Amino acid sequence: MTRKRLRIKPQPPIDRWAHPTGRRPWWLAIALAGLGLLLAGVAPSRVHDVFRDGSVKISEWRLNQAVTVGGPRRTEPAPSALDQTIVSLLNNQNDGDAQAAFKNDDQTQDDFCPT
Amino acid sequence: MARPMIANITKQRRWNLARIRPWVQTGFLAVWLDPLMLRWHAVPGCVFHCYACPLATVACPIGLMAQFAAVHVIPLMAIGVLVVVGALVGTAVCGWACPFGFMQDLLARIPTPKFSLPSWMGHGRYLTLIGLVLIVPVLLGAEHWLFFCNVCPAGALEGAMGQSIYRGQLFIPNTIKITVTILVLGLALFTYRPWCRVLCPLGGIFALFNRGSLLYLHYNAGRCTECNLCRSRCKYDVKLDQSINNGSCVRCLECTNCPAITVTIAGREPESPQKHLPASATEA
């Protein structure tokens, strides 16, 4: 006695993340988490030490500007002295030298806006 | 009987969003190239565009991440921007907004024989991200020759080459990145988007969000006739009937020429298999 085999067309696996009916709104949770990170980054309380002793602090906003404008790949606009100071720290220069140069430079002091 | 009906459906749906993609990419290029001279370099962008370019509007998020890694700071702003954009559109940023991807698309239009890349090479993006963007800056600093910005082809093309020509030093000290650029642009003539698919750390980050993003591609198995139209349209060798929101996809939407594939947003009801069939098809 022979048994007739059923031919079943193979179905693609269900994409459980991008569910067709949108019942799993992962995107919303991820987007809110990203928004939280973004807001935490721009928050005034988020500051970074320019010098290791904590005598000069800058916001993340300002640090973004410093590493892009004052970094080794800069072109325009011209970096301020603070940008260059931060970049000198990026380049592992001596903290003391950079700090002294920072304190002796009036333009840097004018440019520096305490957070 | 079924074949001619499917041909009719395909003909009806021939126009799709992918046809306006070059124009959208050109529009975004105008945004990244700072027509208003805004220079918001403190703002992390969401595309691969070097801030060393004199015309860059916003900062490159990968450059920021690498520079922050060198000073041992977590770049919350840059990560936040990438997570938000990734959650909304996934790799559609790569396909529709990235200027470096656009340039590779333009090079791919030159009629040369194209070869495909094996899908496992996509893991190279994470090696670049973890190795050159995170580990090298943290351990060796921003001056090391393997620091990501020192090998980045977008940086070479938009920043270093212009500066080198201006200073009369074409290759030194940018030898490595200019060599990488020449290799990537040369490869882009013979395969689609080699940088994006094999090495781009930003593409790797956005690929992580593809499966769960607000915008996604929907494959309707009920409408598939196994005509292979979608796979023949896809330049990135994505297995559209098995994992359509794969990380290899840049969401160019060429596959939406196939009636079984639609682009939609989460929360919207997918279209019924019978909804767009012509009357003759539903009668049969």
Image: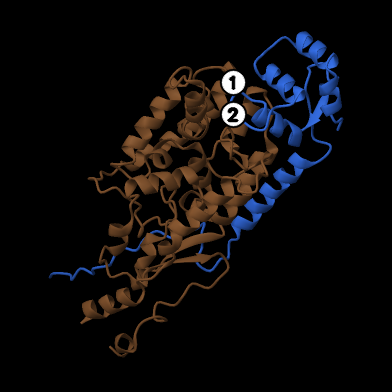
Chain colours: A blue, B brown
Which amino acid lies under the numbered mark 2 shown in the image of this protein?
A: Ala
Which amino acid lies under the numbered mark 1 shown in the image of this protein?
A: Ala
The numbered mark, 1 or 2, whose residue comes first in the sequence reads 2
Task: Give percent across and percent down for residue B68.
Answer: 65, 28
Label 2 sits on residue: B66
Task: Give percent across and percent down for residue A107.
Answer: 82, 22
Toward the left, the furthest residue is A1
Q: Is residue A15 visible?
A: no
Chain letter, disc 2 residue: B
Distance (Cα) linking label 1 and label 2: 8 Å
Give the vertical position of B271 relative to A104 (above or below).
below
Q: Residue at x 65, y 44 (%)?
A: B37
The answer to the question of whether label 1 and label 2 lie on touching residues, with beta carbons closer than 8 A, is yes
Q: Nearer the viewer, residue B129 or B152?
A: B152
Q: Are marks 1 and 2 on the same chain?
A: yes
Give the vertical position of B252 relative to B103 (above or below).
below
Secondary structure of the residue carrying tag 2 is: helix
Q: Is residue B227 left or right of residue B55?
A: left
Label 1 sits on residue: B142
Give the vertical position of A95 relative to B29 (above or below).
above
Secondary structure of the residue carrying tag 1 is: loop
Mark 1 Cα shell of 10 Å, populated few (<14), some (14-19), many (≥20): many
Q: Residue at x 60, y 60 (%)?
A: A25
User: For residue B62, which quarter of the picture?
Assistant: top right
Q: Nearer the viewer, residue B224 or A111?
A: A111
Mark 2 Cα shell of 10 Å, populated few (<14), some (14-19), many (≥20): many
